[in-house]
Image: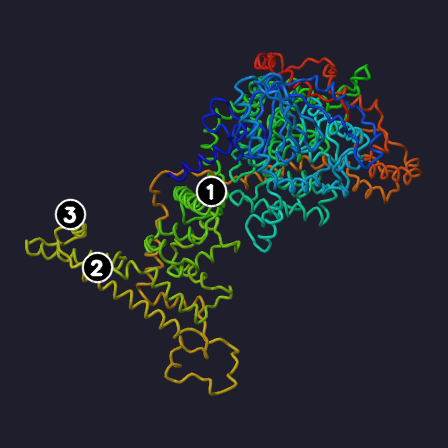
Amino acid sequence: MAFFEVLKEKAINTFNQVVLDKKVGLDVLTKEQIFCFSFNIPEEEKVLYSSKVVFDFGRKERERLSGNSSSSNHKLPGRRDAAAARTQHYQGSLYLTEHFFLFQDDQDLQDCSFTLQISTIRKVEREPLTFDNYLVLILTTTSNLRLRFLFDAGRRSDNERFALGLSNVLKKNQPNIKKLDQFIQTCYSEYLLSRNKVSNIVVEHVPPGGLGLMFKFPGNPKESRDKTKLKLWFDLFIEDGRNLSLIKTPMFYKLIRVGLPNRLRGEIWELCCGSMYLRLHNTGEYTKLLEVNKEKKSFAIEEIEKDLNRSLPEYAAYQSEEGIGRLRRVLTAYSWKNPELGYCQAMNIVVAALLIYMSEEQAFWTLNVLCDRIVPGYYSKTMYGTLLDQRVFESLVQTTMPLLWEHITKNDISLSVVTLPWFLSLYLSSMPLVFAFRILDIFFMQGPKTLFQVALAIFKVNGEALLKTEDDGSFISLIKEYFYTLDSSAHPASPQLKYRNITKFQDLLSVAFKEFSIIDDDMINSHRNKHRESIYQNISTFVKRTEIRNLPKTPNIPQKSLDILYDRFYSVVEQSNITKGSGSSSIDLKAFVKFMSEICDWVNAEEITDSGFGEFPFLTKTFEHWDSRKQNALSFSDLVIGLNALVEPDLMTSMSNFFSIYDIKKDGKIDNEGILKMSEDLLYITNPWKQGLLMDGVTRAKIQQEVTEEILKRQDVDGETVVDGSGSEKVAAAAEEAPHIHVDREKILTQQMERYLESASTFIKRAFEYAQPKEDEEEPLIRDLYISSKISHNAALDPTHPVYLNLATFRMVILADETYELLFSTTLRQSIHIDRPLDSDFNPMRNLRDMFDGLLADGMKVASKVRSRMDSKASQLSNNSGAGSSGSSLRSNKTQTTAATAAATSTGNTAVQEDDEDRDDDFGVILIDEKDKDLILLATETSTLNEPKKSLLTSSNSIKDVGDTDNAKKGRTDVNLIDFGAQ
């Protein structure tokens, strides 16, 4: 069908929103899209002007803040001399769009790049030169940075056009400056500088942040050197700008690799993925979505409510209304923002993690970018992105670790059972949060390839042990135990202290980003393009088989008919979704009527588009009766169960099923109004026979009888006689071979029409005649209210004497009429063609949520013990208050002080720690150990601190063979991702 082609094309385009393989990507994405994705800016941006430039930057010469004497003497630790900073020049490309001013170095993107929101440019100057063809522009930003651009010595007109374009964009953008001023108040980086009096912008209050500000952040801040990391970012913001005016230099990437400080993590995440720009450009939209849809209900909201209490329940915030409320609002707002997607499995886990470090609005826009751009298709109704990446991962394991792959296939171990929760929940449901967040730091910086690199490293590090497993259970158990000990030493038996101090998590990152640096976006997209078509085909087949197998027993519908009904149901679903723009996997009343028109002789498809549902009272009532969840929507299971009852061959059961449709109160009684509606619906159902369009069994028998009589008459005339049973067979054969025999079909059909009208009249007459009066009816208080005797004799019109029809009486009335008895025994069932083939082939891609519910839940069970090691300060204090012990970390491998000493020093330590945390962003008060800073920065350079060990997995040198060429070219980019610093 054409509409399925549209769906398929839409799915492919969505997935290609990542930077695809160059040859394929250029065919699918426009140049503007490729550009926007490379800079993580909104897709609507278009390049107005571009030019080759030589760029350098530094702080303004005069940095003293007026009216603040203390700031004039404030020492900026690690500050570079402005003149020295300009000695570093970067040659690259400069771009101008309607809302952004962008630059990237031509040699290496991580050497220097920036994405300046145009409102952050506060001043533009032209530097005079003696050479006419050159143009030098100097820009001053809100971060007090001085950016200098030497334009290429090409045509002066091109350079002047760029300068004029920049001037016009700045003028056009002036109304947005106020919006920027308000937005900056929500950035913690700006608050950090303002509090330490090194910024002209005043931020008086702590910006809205994550739940960690209220319930404490996971992990131990002292062990992770959180304060030192924050100080390093503080220095970076002074030198290279912050938030919307940040210049990304190698130090920016290095500080991300060593782990982000808790209070800045959310802001750096949204800066790296680009959701910060969406938040600025759509100020107020999140609040508006919640307000406009405040009283509305939807299927997505019901699904959200089911999952709220299953979202990181070990974290204290999600045991309180504050945390649950934030999570509910973000997920609900997104379901209204993107109704086609609504809510999908694992969204709750990801958003719950984001909210620990982000405000609601930050998490909302980050979820948008995550679903639409970073991992498209992961959180969708078909989850095709996750399925495709599972196939890509299997292919990578086969390529890079052939010995392990051979072992996996030999023992029939399903990798997807192990790894699907890793990808779907971004490792949040599988390993301790403190480590999962470290992976997310790099994930938001470099994209989805991080998921593959870490997964491959897990298999590589545990490879020799995995080769000894023989089934899924032992495979999962081994990985589970590994996650549980990520904080322990990777080389406990090493004689050298430096090796013993390396944890398993540090070793994991070393393997992931050094040995698997060859796994880049190009390689991943190449594998995706290779397996994409097969995944699309397999999704429908697999889910169809799974969903049909999980249906309740339907003895009246054979397997072949179930297959046809499945295809027909989802063809109607997808057509309805295209019309409504939704992503539902159920059908509403209008779609139900269309479905029934395709299989029932008594539903006229031509009446659907022009008439209201008043023309289909029986279908409306049937729809409501089959709607088991009472959500004004039928699932495939609802429909099949209902059809199984409607085509029931047993006469008595068939009448019972029909009666139950009108038994609204489920008390076995149908009142006056119900009897009238039942009579009208019987008239509606029998329309094709009442109008002579179809013939029932009685009419066909009568025609057969007349044909037989005519044949017998002719045989008598010819002198032939029928004397035995074999003669009857000859008569039947003659009847079939005698189309020339004339039968008055019009007369017979007229008799059928009269018979059905008479049956309808007889039914309503007998129904009220034999109906039983309702008991305990109140007598009218005023006799004058009695209806006159002229109409009171008609029970159907006498409201003063209500009656009811029970099942036994209904059966009696039906069985007393030959036509209606035949209707329930044969005619109705034969008029419903459940095995009628579709007009054309249809291959819908179905919703996989139910299938993955169990799989992800199983992965979360595996991780439940692991996550209990999360060092939540709130739960720590709660657990220790009863025992009187100190706030020791949940990480059991660390050395503990004795219980007596802990109890004695508990109060003092807690007070000091709380005081430090309250002031951990005031660097005018708190002194940071410079050696600690150097240790963290040096950690990213110590990539050689891996104790040599030989692995059976690399005996084939497969990893080296795959990536020698790419590694030589890109090794510099990923080698420094290794972190041997604090976690």
C-alpha distance separating marks 1 and 3: 44 Å
Query: 413 and 294: which one is in front?
Result: 294
SS label for mark 1 = helix
Expressed as whole percent of the image width and height from the top left, the position of residue 707 reads 16, 55
Q: Earlier in the sequence, mark 1 or mark 2?
A: 1
Whether residue 468 can be seen here = no
**Which residue does the numbered mark 1 point to in the structure image?**
548
| Residue for point 83% across, 30% down | 74
Q: Position of residue 609 (x, y in %)?
A: 36, 53
Q: Residue 315's mark?
A: none
SS for dot 3: loop
Return the x and y of residue 71 as percentages of the image width and height. 82, 33
Asked which colour scheme the image uses, the reply is: rainbow
- Give the camera-side residue of 719 and 625: 625
In the picture, which quadrant includes the N terminus? top left
Q: Is residue 520 left or right of residue 188?
A: left
Judge whether residue 509 can be spotted in this image: yes
Q: Which mark is residue 737?
A: 3
Amino acid type, residue under disc 2 in the picture: Lys
List the single residue furthest toward the left: 718
Residue at mark 2: 702
